[in-house]
Image: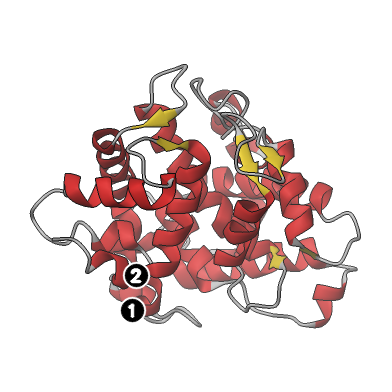
């Protein structure tokens, strides 16, 4: 997806993360420390989901300040809250400690920077065209066709990816929707990078099974947190609605492994009848699985 789409890490642009040294040192940031103290309202030494929700709402307000979105005062997307908690919580129930909280704010700062670069018209949201530009900044070769090379991502696929995260279906992505897109695709990128040999441009059914297993494993903490009692009181959160589209979660609720026949059927569907899946076709497959949810899962024999 990034650069050659066949190398090691493909994370740059909207997918780039601070290096390990920067992560370790971020706890020294006085602004991050002050924010932690401000939102740790019960003085427990950790940030729980409700406190995290308040902190993220404050971040969103800063991002949207002076834009059209500032007029709406919408809450931070509850699903994105869960994604961030699952990524950074070091304890059960989404409890985030100071180091993790500082790393999260550092992460959001980088996403905020990219979001600001993309939102060229300063509306406080990004359109599909702006998302396509963000993907190009991140190393995607965003073309108008499906045959633009090993790093190609057609405008049609970019459009579908954007639509999958447009929670309120208003045709644009707000900052919190963009954050969720980033977090979710981090998992897909990591799984592809870690399981596809350098130089390879397509994957077999067996490789797809390995990638899906890797994605599922990386998302287990998210699934567990979504079912935790602490998530019940999160404003706007619906566990069933959240887990329903997570096909990668539903696929593995049964003890048997992801079936090779299912992998073959999915590859044929998205490769036009072949048994090898390009990266762009993989992107389209993941978007399809997210949107289709249980309907696709029931197709497993």
Above-or-below relation of 232 to 44: below
Q: Is residue 92 visible?
A: no
Q: Quadrant of residue 208?
A: top left
Name which residue lies at 44% across and 17% down. 198
Q: Locate the N terminus by quadrant.
A: top right
Query: Residue 274's image quarter?
Result: top left
Q: How many residues crowd mark 1 within 10 Å: few (<14), some (14–19), many (20+)?
A: few
Q: Is residue 226 left or right of residue 103?
A: left
Residue ID for mark 2 = 243
**Up-down relation of residue 65 to residue 236 (above or below):** above
Alpha carbon separation for disc pair 1 and 2: 5 Å
Q: In this image, 239 relative to 167: left or right?
A: left
Q: Is the Cβ of the residue at disc 1 closer than 8 Å to that at disc 2? A: yes
Rate crowding at label 2 as few (under 14), some (14 to 19) or many (20 or more) other CA atoms within 10 Å. Answer: many
**Numbered badge on residue 240:** 1
Side of 192 relative to 168 (left or right)? left
């Amino acid at each position: 997806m990034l650069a050659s789409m066949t190398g090691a890490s493909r994370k740059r642009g909207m997918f780039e993360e601070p290096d390990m040294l920067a992560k370790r040192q971020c706890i020294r940031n006085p602004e991050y420390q002050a924010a932690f103290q401000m939102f740790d309202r019960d003085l427990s030494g950790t940030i729980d989901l409700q406190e995290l929700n308040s902190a993220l709402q404050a971040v969103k307000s800063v991002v949207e300040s002076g834009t059209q979105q500032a007029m709406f005062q919408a809450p931070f997307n509850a699903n994105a809250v869960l994604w961030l908690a699952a990524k950074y919580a070091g304890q059960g129930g989404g409890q985030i400690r100071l180091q993790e909280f500082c790393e999260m704010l550092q992460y959001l700062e980088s996403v905020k920077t990219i979001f600001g670069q993309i939102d060229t018209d300063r509306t406080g949201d990004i359109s599909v065209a702006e998302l396509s530009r963000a993907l190009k900044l991140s190393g995607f070769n965003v073309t108008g066709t499906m045959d633009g090379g090993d790093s190609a991502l057609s405008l049609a696929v970019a459009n579908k990816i954007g639509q999958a995260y447009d929670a309120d279906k208003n045709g644009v992505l707000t900052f919190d929707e963009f954050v969720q897109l980033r977090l979710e695709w981090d998992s897909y990128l990591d799984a592809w990078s870690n399981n596809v040999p350098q130089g390879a441009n397509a994957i077999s059914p067996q490789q797809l099974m390995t990638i899906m297993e890797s994605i599922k494993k990386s998302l287990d903490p998210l699934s567990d947190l979504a079912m935790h009692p602490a998530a019940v009181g999160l404003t706007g959160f619906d566990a069933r609605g959240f887990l329903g589209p997570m096909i990668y979660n539903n696929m593995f609720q049964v003890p048997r492994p992801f079936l090779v026949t299912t992998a073959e059927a999915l590859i044929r569907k998205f490769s036009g009848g072949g048994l090898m899946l390009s990266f762009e076709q993989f992107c389209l497959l993941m978007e399809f699985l997210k949107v289709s949810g249980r309907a696709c899962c029931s197709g497993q024999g």
